[in-house]
């Protein structure tokens, strides 16, 4: 049963089979479908294709945040280095005056 997916009714718990193609369609469209006893049900969560798209977008956003953080880190390192040099130069001048 390669092309079939097993479903279980959430009301009467009867098990039935639908094609995987139809199952994918139902997951994506969130349309109501019925068990053999007539109980309506539908998929409410994200479909796999929607989940993949969302996860790719999340990954891209995370990479962008990482890149911005790296650039900010480099800039802050430069500022710190500049301040340290300024401070050591000032301390050097002060010490030479007192010696």
Image (cartoon, rainbow, N blue to C red):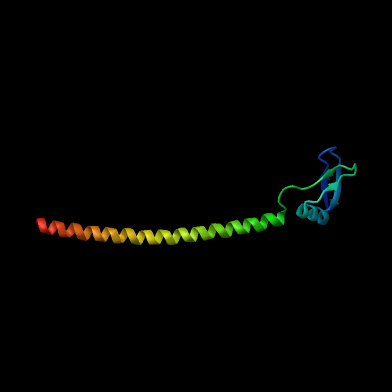
Report x, y in % for residue 8. Answer: 82, 42
Q: Which residue is depicted at the point 46% across and 58% down?
A: 69
Q: Which residue is depicted at the point 20% across and 59% down?
A: 90
Report x, y in % for residue 45. Answer: 72, 48
Q: Which residue is depicted at the point 72% across and 53% down?
A: 47
Residue furthest right in the image: 37
Residue 2 visible? no
Image label count: 0
Residue 49 left/right relative to 76: right
Residue 25 left/right relative to 69: right
Judging depth in this view, the residue of 16 and 25 nearest the camera is 25
Residue furthest top in the image: 12
Judging depth in this view, the residue of 3 and 18 nearest the camera is 18
| Quadrant showing the C terminus | bottom left
Residue 57 visible? yes
Judging depth in this view, the residue of 21 and 95 nearest the camera is 95
Report x, y in % for residue 40. Answer: 84, 44
Q: Which residue is depicted at the point 14% across and 56% down?
A: 95
Report x, y in % for residue 75. Answer: 38, 61
């Amino acid at each position: 049963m390669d092309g079939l997916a097993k479903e279980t009714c959430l009301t009467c718990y009867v098990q039935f089979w639908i094609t995987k193609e139809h199952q994918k369609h139902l997951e994506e469209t969130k349309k109501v479908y019925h068990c053999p006893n007539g109980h309506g049900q539908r998929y409410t969560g994200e479909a796999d294709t929607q989940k993949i798209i969302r996860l790719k977008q999340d990954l891209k956003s995370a990479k962008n945040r990482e890149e911005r953080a790296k650039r900010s880190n480099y800039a802050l390192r430069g500022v710190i280095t500049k301040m340290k040099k300024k401070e050591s130069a000032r301390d050097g001048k002060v010490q030479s005056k007192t010696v």
